[in-house]
Amino acid sequence: MRRRLVAIGIVGVVALTLLMWFLRHDRGAVHYTGFVEGEERILRSEVSGRVVEVAFAEGDKVPARALVARLADDDIRSRLAAKRQEVAVQEAQIRRQEEQVTLLEHTWKENVDAHHAELAQSQSAADLASRTMAREQSLVKTGASTAQLLDQARSARDQARSAVDRAHDMLDRTLAEEGEITVARHQFEVLRQQRELALAEIAELEVTHAKYEIRAPDVPTVVQTQFIWAGELAQPGTAILAVLDPRDKYVQVYVPVADIDRFRVGRRVDIELDSEPGHRVPGEVSFVANQATFTPEKIETRSDRLGQVYRAKVRILADVERFQPGTEGNVYVADAARPSGTESGAARASDEERR
């Protein structure tokens, strides 16, 4: 009797275990085996220089836009200082030239106005002298005036006409002086262009100078690998740090051709780590390759490698910090009929490898 009870107990435990396994695993869900990965970003030097400082080491948390490394920038700073001094000198020259142009323009306008007024006055005096002489001529003919008075009137008219000619000459010479203003304006524009060119060179040097500081991405990251240390020489393209956004991780899987219709971008799925069976978190298909490839050896069995698969990525939507790059897990596509009445090729490969 006791043996029968023990046997019944063992059968009950086995049945309960099988029931729990059955409830925990959705027999209607297709699953694919893959590995957790993250989008590593390599921070590289864009210029040549000796590394002065690397502010973060492997495992360090890096704030967004933080300064992660500096290169020696003595030469570029010296060139910037010299160019800025050159611009300061040009600014002073421009101010002086502008003042000279303003003075020339003001003086020239005053002189032109004065000579116009002088010409108008001389012309009026000449007209009066001409009328006076004409009257004297009439009076001489009638005997009301003398030849001496006529000669005086003629002399006054000639002097007035000479004054008009002199006024014309002075006005013409003053108008011709506008050419000096044109030359001064041209010199002013040349100085301004030289300054603009120097400012453009400064802007270019500042862009280059900024490259001597290597900064983190716009989101917080964690250092995965340090490639270079203070005192070493960096060249354009030299890797400084590899960083990873701890909130941006995904599981990369390989989907057989027969299953691709149910594995579309935007599809919600479940993700389960092998190290935490039964604990699933939500995910979303974020990428599916356009072309099929032969199945990678590390995922599939030899027989499955004869087929083709699509590489896909499933973004992890919750508890991201629990998923470490390199760990293995399964992606479950819920509410989908099992293809050909069996598991997917990826799942079969995982089971065979475990056996």
Image (cartoon, grey):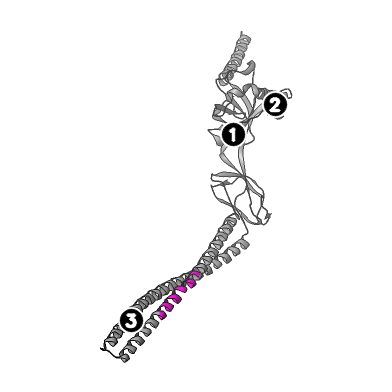
Q: Nearer the viewer, residue 187 or 4?
A: 187
The quadrant holding residue 82 is: bottom right
Q: Where the C terminus falls, by quadrant?
A: top right
Quadrant of the rendered image containing residue 72? bottom right
**What range of the chain is rendered magenta?**
165-182
Q: Nearer the viewer, residue 299 or 191?
A: 191
Q: Residue at x 39, y 74 (%)?
A: 110
Does the CB distance between marks 2 and 1 fall below 8 Å? no
Q: CA–CA distance between discs 3 and 1?
A: 107 Å
Under mark 3, the amino acid is Ser
Amino acid type at mark 1: Tyr
Query: What residue type is disc 2 on?
Result: Glu
Q: Is residue 92 visible?
A: no
Q: Is residue 319 left or right of residue 347?
A: left
Please, what secondary structure does the residue beneath circle 3 have?
A: helix
Rendered location of residue 168, percent (x, y): 41, 77
Label 2 and label 1: CA atoms lie apart by 20 Å
Question: SS for tag 1?
Answer: strand
Mark 2 lies on a secondary structure that is loop
Q: Residues within 10 Å of mark 3 (few under 14, many from 20)?
A: some
Characterize the local packing of mark 2: few (<14), some (14-19) or many (20 or more) Cα atoms within 10 angstroms: many
Q: Would you place residue 308 above or below residue 74 in this image?
A: above
Q: Which mark is residue 130?
A: 3
Among the two numbered marks 3 and 2 on one chain, the one whose residue lies closer to the N terminus: 3
Residue 91 is a magenta residue = no
- According to the picture, the residue beneath numbered tag 2 turns out to be 300
Verify CB contact (< 8 Å) between mark 3 and mark 1. Answer: no
Residue density around tag 1, few if under 14, some if 14–19, many if 20 or more, within 10 Å: many
Q: Does residue 147 lie above or below 193 as drawn?
A: below
**Residue 54 x, y percent position in the rendering:** 62, 53
Which of the two labelled residues, at mark 2 and mark 1, occupies the earlier sequence position? Answer: 1
Which residue carries the number 1 mark?
A: 250
